[in-house]
């Protein structure tokens, strides 16, 4: 089972990938430094370190689907 706290939603608009807000600094509409080619590589098992351009927070992507990024660490906080 995939741990929900290790997932973060993203959106694709044209050829760009965005998150609604950064999990580290809460900046809005963050453009991710990802390319479509890299998405395909991640889906086949290659890991990718993602550095958020707003605050330079880092996480390791271990898998990705059409809606969520799966990280190797907890990115969601529960209230």
Image (cartoon, grey):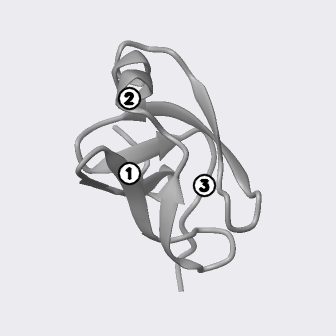
Q: Is residue 55 visible in the rendered structure shown here?
A: yes
Query: To which residue does mark 2 refer?
Result: 39
Secondary structure beneath dot 3 equals: loop
Secondary structure beneath dot 2 equals: helix
Q: Are marks 3 and 2 in contact (CB under 8 Å)?
A: no
C-alpha distance separating marks 1 and 2: 10 Å
Query: To which residue does mark 1 refer?
Result: 17
Please tell me whether mark 3 or mark 2 is closer to you in this view: 2
Q: Nearer the viewer, residue 55 or 16?
A: 16
Q: What residue is drawn where x is 60% and y is 80%?
A: 26
The numbered disc on residue 74 is 3
> Which sits earlier in the primary sequence, circle 3 or circle 2?
2
Question: Is 19 left or right of 68, judged from the image as shown?
Answer: right
Q: What residue is drawn where x is 37% and y is 35%?
A: 64
Using the rendered view, name the quadrant where residue 2 is placed. top left
Q: Nearer the viewer, residue 49 or 29?
A: 29
Picture coordinates of residue 46 (x, y %)? Answer: 51, 15
Q: Quadrant of the N terminus?
A: top left
C-alpha distance separating marks 3 and 2: 21 Å
Q: Is residue 9 visible in the rendered structure shown here?
A: no
Picture coordinates of residue 36 (x, y %)? Answer: 35, 30
Question: Is 42 left or right of 26, judged from the image as shown?
Answer: left
Q: Are marks 1 and 2 in contact (CB under 8 Å)?
A: yes
């Amino acid at each position: 089972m995939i741990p929900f706290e290790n997932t973060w939603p993203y959106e694709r608009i044209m050829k760009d990938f965005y998150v609604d807000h950064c999990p580290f600094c809460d900046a809005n509409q963050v453009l991710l430094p990802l390319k479509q080619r890299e998405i395909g590589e991640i889906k086949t098992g290659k890991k990718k370190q993602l550095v958020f351009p707003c605050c330079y927070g880092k996480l390791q992507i271990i898998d990705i689907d059409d809606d969520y990024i799966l990280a190797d660490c907890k990115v969601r906080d529960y209230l």
